[in-house]
Image (cartoon, helix red, strand yellow):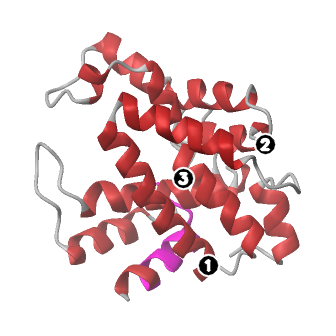
Amino acid sequence: MEGTPATQRRTVGVAGTRPPEQAVRRLARELRDHHRPTAEHSNRLAVVARALSDRMGLDALDATEVELVAVLHDVGKLTVAPEILEQRGPLTPEQRVIILRHTIEGAELLACTAGLEHLAPAVRATHERWDGAGYPDGLAGTAIPLAARIVTCADAYDAMACRRPYRPALPRAEVLGRLGDGAASHFDPAVVGAALEVFAD
């Protein structure tokens, strides 16, 4: 956890107003209609991200912002064809470029959506890494918005803990071990610490 709740609010990027629920619901519905598994993943992520936020001591407003980033973190996949999202084998170089752009597309969409503009930087950064080896901007450490750091860890947990078309869910001990191994490289160590406590419960 970083400093006081006020410091955390500046890191999360709260605009001070509650985003319009109608816009969030519309985007979530569009994502569900486009690719239901992605929407279901985002809904699970919102629950996990909220639990991590609460464990880290974020106040209710900040925790809600993190939850919204989780719900909308994959909204850029509206620009990705479902057959690419459902592909089980390796992506072609062209398909990989499309997938890697989804955070940029999502951020651009939110930047043009009234009331959700302030969520765009965090959505754009949900595939950055603590060590700077992520994408699309190579941000590192606390330069990554706190909401994105929380969602990134929650995303990894869900990816490992849930069944995938190409593999079963991993055992809980293995999931927690992999999260711990990724602290200070892939993930913010403070977020991993909170995650290990939450998931151990």
Q: Say whether residue 64 is magenta.
A: no
- Decide: few, some or many residues near mark 3? Use Cα within 10 Å; few <14, some 14-19, many ≥20: many
Disc 3 element = helix
State the extent of the magenta-drawn residues as a range.
185-197
For the residues labelled 1 and 3, the Cα–Cα distance comes to 14 Å
Q: Earlier in the sequence, mark 1 or mark 2?
A: 1
Q: Residue at x 52, y 34 (%)?
A: 75
Q: What is the three-letter code of the residue carrying label 3?
A: Ala
Q: What is the three-letter code of the residue carrying label 1?
A: Asp
Q: Seen in the image, is 1 located left or right of residue 190?
A: right
For the residues labelled 1 and 2, the Cα–Cα distance comes to 21 Å
Q: Position of residue 140 (x, y in %)?
A: 63, 48
Q: Main secondary structure of the magenta part?
A: helix
Pointer 1 residue: 54
Closer to the camera in the image, 29 or 192: 29
Quarter of the picture containing the C terminus is bottom left
Q: Position of residue 141 (x, y in %)?
A: 65, 55
Pointer 2 residue: 118
Q: Seen in the image, is 101 located left or right of residue 118?
A: left
Q: Position of residue 195 (x, y in %)?
A: 46, 75
Q: What is the three-letter code of the residue carrying label 2?
A: His
Q: Quadrant of residue 188?
A: bottom right
Q: Which mark is residue 70?
A: 3
